[in-house]
Amino acid sequence: MAFFKKKEHINPLMAMFVGVTILIVGLIFAKTYAASYFLSGAYVLLIGFGYYKSCIRILPAFIILSAIFFLAFYYGKNSLIAGVTMVNRLGAIFVGLIPGMNIEPICMTRSLNQLKVPRAITLGMLITISFMPLLREEIARIREAMKTRGAGNILNPKVFYRAFIIPFVIRLVNISDTLALSIETRGFSIESNNATTYKKETINVVDVTLLLLVIVGVVLLAVFK
Amino acid sequence: MQNEQDDITQLLENSKGNYQEETKAESTQLQPRIQIFKKFAIKDIVFLAIMAACMLVTGGIMPLVVHVPVFGIIQLALALQFSIFPTIGLMKVRKVGSVFFMSLCCGIFFAFMYLPMFVCIMICAVVTELINIIIFRGYEKDIAVAVSGAIYFPFTLPLLYVYYNFLYTFNGQEGEAVNAFIGANAGAAIGISAAVIAISVLGAFVGYIVSKELIRVGVMKK
């Protein structure tokens, strides 16, 4: 049975739902100490469900930022709960981000296709998320080229405009044209209703267990807040 | 002789009048109907999605500033990039729905960072599109693009005020958020709001200039 079959990753829509639930609930109950326990529990839960790499990745940024906000609000308002509230809010954002960080763009697109979301939107989302690492590379390349040419300080508005913004946008336009051409030459159509999904994203016992455990956490938080 | 000249003059005037009427009728017939809604092609979607990716990457600073209790700090951090890139996108894809599409593509990922901002951005995109349709009936004119690029992001300010006023909680008492974010220093809130509007206008101007330059040299085609 597909429901009990082992999968490599959590269903993307389920992961999104879990992430948004943690974020919303964390923000709503941020002013309580119980929210700290809920967020800690969610963090441990996500480690257990295979998100350990993302959990470790966000930890340094969270520790630094939460320390800054905690100290600022603890001493600024002379109240422990004010500091804890800020840490909870940041925690809700960071823990809520973890499931989203692990979603493969293609898996997300497949899930949305299964839900009959218009192909224009799924294509747009796929490009947006896939393009982000490429964008960082392009920025690094342009900055490197600026150094090679001795263009000057990037903080100078004239240099920034002429040596950074213009080459950057030119590059974006070229990439866009090439990408559009390659999509069209492969016969991709945004109006086709008969398109099928290559691999179907299914919901299995692991997804349901994760969701149930998060819901149990939310209920406990609401009861013991 | 005089009669002949009068006849010729009369004939010329008549023919001139007829010609003017005919040309007027022809021009009325040939006048293209303004089509507000146009279908998106794949190249449009790709370009708008890339612009959305730029907005998303540069907007990555948002989670770090969302809880700083200064009204408009999010908009201040994002105004420049959220006016430059939509303006560039609109300069190339002059179709109604472009702003909404860009907002959707980047906003859905913003939902993970700060859900209210996603809602604000989507509402602002709809409002911007509606204003554009009512005033300019599309993005064919450059002024329509520049105005839409400039007004798009500052619209989040009143929406965020509503959020702080009714939804946000601050140490357990609704309404205190307004005191924390606005009331404690109303002058700063007004100043930051003015700065956000100024930066958005500047960003739209920069986006317009960049696009114009690329269109002039033939890199960017409408």
Image (cartoon, coloured by chain):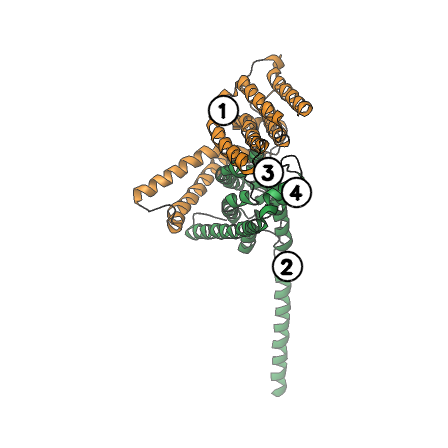
Chain colours: A orange, B green
> In whole angstroms, how far apart are the C-alphas of marks 1 and 3?
23 Å
- Establish if A9 lies above or below B177: above
| Mark 2 or 3, nearer chain start | 2
- Chain letter for mark 2: B
Q: Secondary structure at mark 1?
A: helix
Q: Quadrant of residue A87?
A: top right
Q: Position of residue A10 (x, y in %)?
A: 57, 21
Residue B173 location (% of width, % of height): 66, 37
Res A196 seen here? no
A127 sits left or right of A225 in the view: left
- What is the CA distance from the residue labelled 4 to the residue labelled 3? 18 Å
Discs 4, 1: same chain = no
Task: Identify residue type, mark 3.
Answer: Phe
Q: Is residue A214 above or below residue B139?
A: above
Disc 4 vs disc 3: which is toward the camera? 4
Q: Which residue, given by chain and number where applicable, does mark 2 sit on?
A: B29
